[in-house]
Image (tube, rainbow, N blue to C red):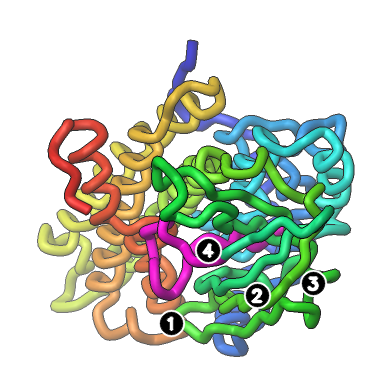
Amino acid sequence: MASVELGEDYPEIRESVRRICADFPNEYWRKMDETEAYPKEFVDALTKAGYLGALIPEEYGGAGLPLRAAGVVLEECHGAGCYAAAAHAQMYTMGSVLRHGSPEQKQKYLPGIASGKLRLQAFGVTEPTTGTDTTKLKTRAVRDGDHYVITGQKVWTSRALHSDLMLLLARTTPLDQVKKKTEGLSVFLVDIRECLGKGLEIRPLKAMINHHATEVFMDGMRVPAANLVGGEGKGFRCILDGMNAERILVSHESIGDARWFIRSASKYATERVVFDRPIGQNQGIQFPIARAYASMQGAEMMLRKAAALFQAGLPCGEDANVAKLLASEASWEAAEACMQTHGGFGYAREYHVERRWREARISRIAPISTNLILAYIAEHVLDMPRSY
């Protein structure tokens, strides 16, 4: 039976992550943002400590920790002001690889991923013309002997230029030839090193935040059939495990962000004196921060439930989506309160609020938008008519 712990769980992991993050202060992240650089030193530090291999079983060199423990790592990173999104894909892709990968695939790739010799940081799902309408994606994979030939395009594939491997979703059976639109999709582990320049092109996609987004173009890219994950045509079920893990993990980041914003706003409100009194003495300042704290606490409990269900192998689609919705909203509520509390200084880069405010906004859009979650709840939880 799944259970939910109360209080601060995994205290040793939390303290260890906090020590790592202390070496990467706000100035480090401001420099990364201003130069659009990849935080290699930070990613290497997390890798060396074993945290990017947290979900990989010990037999493959990983820590074999539950999803909640991996989420705690991300939460503490963001709570300390760091940006773990630069490395989190290596965790949530394990939702697909560990549950659906073959023993041969796990033996071939997991030890290298756990040690840091290999980076699995790219998750190729979204396409420019279909967006979140995943079942209508146009990327095609056609069997040719012991390979698949893949042609198509992906967008918002973060960190593909800083990754050795990419988990890729493609259609192996055309949409008009399947009974259910979720059929005929397949997942592949693509070795970017072998394919780059041979039917694979990756271009950076500049954005509002330093998320290292890319566009991926595939034109006759050949991938060994041995790299098919979970069986041909069964990719949608496979990718859902990755998506549920992703939603739970990024929700931990949102909780960490909320903690940072609430702590920063409370501190500034206590220290900033206007009209001969701390601005935090005014309820107009207090209440938005206090309400953000309450929202964060509620979201965190829902998140613990979702992680417990996932770990127990129980259905968790509803819980993962609700946790993602509540955590992203709590994070943004805290971000707004922090920005408003700082006033004009919230725009000043030296306070780091504007950068973190920009970073927090993405959680209401990606990896799934708030509106799509609401549509999911309406249809699949409340049995209302499908809206899309």
4 or 1: tag closer to the N-terminus? 4
Question: Where residue 158 sits: x, y (%)?
Answer: 58, 69
Q: Secondary structure at mark 3?
A: helix
> Is residue 174 in sight in this rendering?
yes
3 or 2: tag closer to the N-terminus? 3
> Image check: 122 left or right of 174?
right
4 or 3: tag closer to the N-terminus? 4
Question: Where residue 22 sits: x, y (%)?
Answer: 66, 60
Amino acid found under the numbered disc labelled 1 = Met
Label 2 packing within 10 angstroms: few (<14), some (14-19), many (20+): many
Residues marked 4 and 3 touching at CB (< 8 Å): no
Q: Nearer the viewer, mark 1 or mark 3?
A: 3
Q: How many marks?
A: 4
1 or 3: tag closer to the N-terminus? 3
Label 1 packing within 10 angstroms: few (<14), some (14-19), many (20+): few
Question: Where residue 233 sits: x, y (%)?
Answer: 58, 44
Amino acid found under the numbered disc labelled 4 = Gly
Query: Which quadrant would residue 329 be assigned to in this image?
Result: bottom left
Residue for badge 2: 218
> Image check: 377 left or right of 257?
left
